[in-house]
Image (spheres, rainbow, N blue to C red):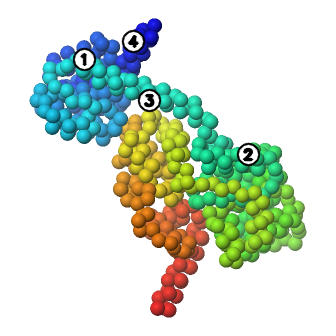
């Protein structure tokens, strides 16, 4: 019974493995293709290398059996073009002039095997059976991963690391109670997704969830955005408008980058949280609101309080419950899961069926530090999904900085030295500006902060640099 089962599995695996035979001798093509079909493989042949490359791009085969010596293109050149087109393709080179050195060179360049003529069919079948078994295993793994994938999601947030499981658990506990929440974590780590999850799991999930990026607006506009304004209260106020606190009354207001607000704005936020009262710009009327405030920041608010840049009373009001969302450097085991999630997302968006990443691309992603965290990873996968023409995303589809060795994790550890936090921020902002060719709008988007905050920080650091030069 076990033998019959093993035989049926081998037959199924062979039928699922499509093979293209390429040789400039039509007789050899027909002979090899017929033999492979007779042993249960799905095989076809051609004498034209360009036709074979076209069939590869269309995904018509997973294995190429190619002659090393062809008039129009030699086997090594064909191997290189094939792997450029699809890094997951298995190329078996066949030659009438076998040598150990040429075999080693072919394997180094990515060939699956190197056989001599006349073909040793038992050995060829063994190689093909190994490849077929590998594809069957990968297919089973993908099916298992697909079934497990749902268990790795929490309200649309993907993660399996212990750090993220703690975030999910705390968010579920907090959501049941109508208390204020402070979400901390580096830029791009997914703080807004956690805030939305808390709201959607709360008793007021059917009510509104209003979002305000505090770093994107100057105080006057932020005042109007949050509290509303009366017609004629300032230039351009052509109509009376409610603010986000009124709009989301009974629901949740999410204050992103709350650490960027001025002390004057912080005192107004404190009044809303303490007294549940707001006042529109230009109106003497005080309105009562019932809202849950969820705030997020990438700053260390405790340090900001000590430095006098953030009100201590507001900090304690906001941080009755604090959820820390770790960056990718703290949870590298989540990178493969996130990659799978984004591949599915952009496969649907761009109508491209991706099988995954090549091993080289996977290593490049795992070695990188990800200063932009999940947002940066998503941008990389989205960009690669647009540009690639193969079923697999390869390292050449990734941004140039990921292809270089200096993109590896820990590459700067040897030169590490303790620096003030403002200096680290300045250096990182400068690197992002250089990457964006000086485009401050794009740099602010990559950093996940408002343009106003970027301009303010650059102005402050430039003034500091001028002062230090004047003192010197």
Q: State the separation of the CA atoms marked 2 and 3.
A: 35 Å
Q: Is residue 242 above or below residue 66?
A: below
Q: Element type at marker 2?
A: helix
Q: State the separation of the CA atoms marked 2 and 1.
A: 59 Å
Q: State the separation of the CA atoms marked 3 and 4.
A: 19 Å
Q: State the separation of the CA atoms marked 4 and 1.
A: 16 Å
Residue 243, image x and y in percent?
77, 62
Name the image quarter holding residue 7: top left
Locate residue 149 relative to residue 14 in the image: left or right. right
Residue at numbered disc 1? 122
Mark 4 neighbour class, 10 Å CA radius: few under 14, some 14 to 19, many 20 or more? few
Residue at coordinates 63% horizontally, 43% vertically from top-left? 156
Residue 138, disc: 3
Residue 326, image x and y in percent?
60, 55
Residue 7, disc: 4
Locate residue 270 relative to residue 332 in the image: left or right. right
The residue mark sitting in front, 2 or 1, is 1
Residue at numbered disc 2? 172
- Circles 4 and 1: CB atoms closer than 8 Å: no
Q: State the separation of the CA atoms marked 3 and 1.
A: 24 Å
Q: Is residue 369 above or below residue 220?
A: above
The residue mark sitting in front, 3 or 1, is 1
Q: Element type at marker 3?
A: helix
- Circles 2 and 1: CB atoms closer than 8 Å: no
- Circles 3 and 4: CB atoms closer than 8 Å: no
Taking depth in this image into account, of 332 and 242 the one nearest to the observer is 332
- Circles 3 and 1: CB atoms closer than 8 Å: no
Sequence order check, earlier mark of 3 and 1 = 1
Sequence order check, earlier mark of 3 and 4 = 4
Instruction: Evaluate whether residue 280 shows in this view.
Output: no
- Circles 2 and 3: CB atoms closer than 8 Å: no
Q: Element type at marker 1?
A: helix
């Amino acid at each position: 019974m076990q033998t019959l089962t093993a035989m049926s599995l081998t037959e199924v695996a062979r039928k699922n493995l499509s093979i293209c035979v390429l040789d400039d001798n039509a007789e050899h093509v027909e002979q090899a293709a017929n033999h492979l079909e007779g042993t249960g493989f799905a095989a076809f042949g051609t004498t034209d290398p360009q036709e074979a490359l076209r069939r590869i791009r269309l995904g018509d085969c997973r294995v190429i059996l190619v002659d090393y010596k062809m008039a129009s293109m030699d086997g090594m050149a064909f191997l290189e073009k094939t792997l450029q087109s699809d890094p997951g393709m298995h190329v078996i080179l066949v030659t009438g002039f076998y040598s150990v050195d040429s075999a080693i060179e072919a394997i180094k360049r990515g060939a699956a095997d190197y056989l001599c003529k006349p073909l040793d069919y038992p050995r060829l079948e063994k190689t093909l059976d190994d490849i077929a078994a590998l594809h069957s295993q990968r297919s089973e793994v993908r099916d298992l991963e697909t079934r497990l994938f749902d268990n790795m999601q929490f309200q649309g947030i993907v993660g399996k690391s212990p750090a993220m499981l703690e975030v999910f658990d705390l968010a579920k506990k907090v959501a049941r109670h109508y208390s204020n929440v402070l979400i901390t974590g580096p830029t791009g780590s997914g703080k807004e997704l956690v805030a939305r999850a808390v709201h959607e799991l709360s008793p007021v999930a059917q009510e509104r969830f209003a979002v305000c990026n505090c770093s994107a607006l100057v105080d006057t506009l932020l005042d109007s955005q949050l509290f509303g304004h009366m017609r004629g209260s300032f230039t351009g106020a052509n109509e009376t408008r409610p603010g986000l606190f009124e709009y989301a009354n009974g629901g949740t207001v999410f204050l992103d980058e709350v650490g960027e607000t001025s002390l004057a704005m912080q005192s107004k936020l404190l009044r809303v949280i303490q007294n549940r009262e707001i006042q529109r710009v230009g109106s003497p009327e005080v309105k009562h609101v019932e809202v849950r405030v969820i705030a997020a920041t990438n700053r260390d608010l405790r340090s900001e309080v000590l430095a006098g840049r953030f009100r201590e009373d507001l900090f304690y009001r906001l941080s009755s419950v604090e959820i820390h969302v770790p960056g990718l450097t703290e949870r590298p085991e989540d990178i493969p899961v996130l990659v799978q999630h984004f591949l599915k997302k952009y496969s649907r968006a761009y109508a491209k069926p991706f099988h995954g990443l090549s091993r080289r691309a996977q290593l490049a992603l795992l070695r990188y530090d990800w200063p932009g965290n999940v947002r940066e990873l998503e941008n990389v996968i989205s960009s690669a999904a647009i540009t690639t023409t193969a079923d697999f995303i390869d390292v050449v589809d990734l941004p140039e900085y990921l292809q270089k060795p200096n993109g590896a994790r820990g590459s700067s550890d040897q030169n590490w030295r303790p620096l003030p936090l403002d200096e680290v921020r300045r250096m990182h902002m400068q690197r992002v500006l250089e990457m964006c060719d000086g485009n401050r709008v794009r740099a602010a988007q990559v950093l996940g902060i408002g343009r106003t905050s970027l301009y303010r920080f650059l102005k402050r650091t430039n003034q500091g640099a001028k002062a230090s030069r004047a003192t010197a």
